[in-house]
Image (spheres, rainbow, N blue to C red):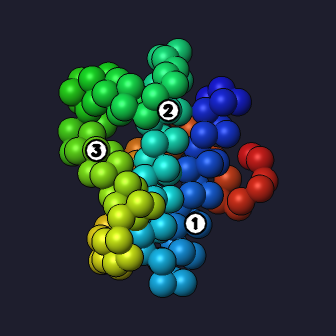
Amino acid sequence: MTEDQRELLEEARDSIAAASLLLDGGFPGYAASRAYYAMFYVAEALLEDEELSFSKHSAVIAAFGQRYAREGKVPIEFHRYLLEAQELRHSGDYGPRGAVSPEVARQQIDRAEQFLRAAQDMIGRVSDTQGEHP
């Protein structure tokens, strides 16, 4: 695992923790947004493994779908999860209050956790404690 990958996976882990706190605090829209970023960071970390880097979210998502989901390196539904999470991020950040239900936010957090577990199985684990390095 490269230093950049480790940092991205730590960001993903921290975003999942933040998403859970936001959901527990009654902010499901913001929780869904953080869950999206966790998935996005995982996608970036995996693409880094192939020395691919992009400046646009849409390019990261497309490359992840092509290089990982379509090629069977991760479950195909992970690409759909990432696309749905991006839409929910927009709803959570810019939509009307209540645009994202607590149940949907919980589902997004669960999916983000699946993403992180899959990445750690592929490229290595990060510490479970925020702020510490392995």
Q: Amino acid at mark 3?
A: Leu
Residue on which disc 2 sits:
44
Residue at 43% across / 47% down in the picture?
A: 39
111 relative to 101, above or below = above
Residue at 77% across / 47% down in the picture?
A: 133
Q: Is residue 93 left or right of residue 106?
A: right
**Residue 119 marker:** none
- Upstream in sequence: badge 1 or badge 2: 1
Q: Nearer the viewer, residue 101 or 123?
A: 101
Residue on which disc 3 sits:
83
Q: Is residue 74 left or right of residue 33?
A: left
Of all residues, the one furthest to the top in this rendering is 51
Residue 14 location (% of width, % of height) = 62, 58
Crowd tier of the residue under label 1, counting other residues whose Cα lies within 10 Å: few below 14, some 14–19, many 20 or above: some
Evaluate if marks 1 and 2 touch, with contact meaning CB atoms under 8 Å apart: no
Q: Residue 125, can we see it?
A: no
Evaluate if marks 2 and 3 touch, with contact meaning CB atoms under 8 Å apart: no
Of circles 3 and 1, the one toward us is 3
70 relative to 75, above or below = above
Q: Nearer the viewer, residue 92 or 133?
A: 92
Residue 94 location (% of width, % of height) = 41, 60
**Residue 17 marker:** 1
Crowd tier of the residue under label 2, counting other residues whose Cα lies within 10 Å: few below 14, some 14–19, many 20 or above: many
Q: Amino acid at mark 1?
A: Ala
Residue 2 location (% of width, % of height) = 65, 26
